[in-house]
Image (cartoon, rainbow, N blue to C red):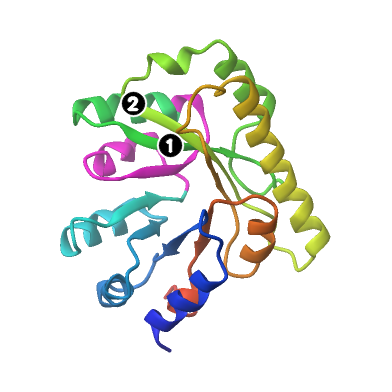
Amino acid sequence: MNIGENIKKINTQLPAHVRLVAVSKTKPVEALLEAYSAGQRIFGENYVQELITKQPLLPADIEWHFIGHLQTNKVKYIAPFVACIQSVDSLKLLREIDKEARKNSRVIDCLLEFGIASDDSKFGFDSQDAFEFLANEQYKNFEGIRICGVMGMGSFVDDEITTRKEYNLLFSIFNRLKNSVFVNESAFCEVSMGMSHDFGIAVAEGSTLVRVGTLVFGERNYK
């Protein structure tokens, strides 16, 4: 398996406005360096401890995206360097990111994660709750964050109809927010959805960020 060739193949399938997030959880630094040498700059990690171990060993211009469930007490460890936290699933977490970002004199890009999976197995905002706190514009008091879009995890099913329905739901949430809360905010432009098995569907349904791991690095060994 050639990681560079894998990245090139995936990128040929992506429109110009869609970016590849190489999901590198459980993968060694050597594999990430191979991807980096092939031009990949955005990497997604799921676990805080793994990310803070890898980050100092890799080039400084890597754009790190945190894509896993994030506990508030661990935000402080990644706040000094993370480029984007895609998995913001509560107002409490948003407040904590803001606090830690300001401590580091940074502004951290954030995506709001919504629960779109039909099996209710994933984390995420309830859309009504999110619209309520965004509508009163309290988020504008958060000087350490920039809300850039939405993220969602589809159900792990081999059913294109279900997958399209879930991704269509996320894109409709994005559009509602864009057309009401974030009308004049050009930074609010990202829809993160799609993984190795379904990123083509996700792109067709409006994704701008696809989180691909297995097709880049191969199968994972969790032992």
Query: As displayed, is residue 104 above or below residue 197?
Result: above
Mark 2 is surrounded, within 10 Å at the Cα level, by few (under 14), some (14 to 19) or many (20 or more) other residues, namely many
Query: As displayed, is residue 81 above or below residue 97?
Result: below
Residue at which label 1 appears:
110
Question: Is residue 168 found left or right of 114 in the rendered image?
Answer: right
Give the number of the disc on residue 98: 2
Q: State the CA–CA distance, disc 1 to disc 2.
A: 10 Å
Residue 88 sits inside the magenta stretch: yes
Identify the residue at image location x=23%, y=45%.
81
Quarter of the N terminus within the rendering: bottom left
Q: Which residue is at the front of the view, 92 or 176?
A: 176
Identify the residue at image location x=43%, y=36%.
110
Residue 197 sits inside the magenta stretch: no
Count of numbered tags: 2
Identify the residue at image location x=74%, y=57%.
163
The answer, for residue 20, to whether it is visible in the render is yes
Measured as percent of width and height from the top left, residue 214 is found at 50, 74
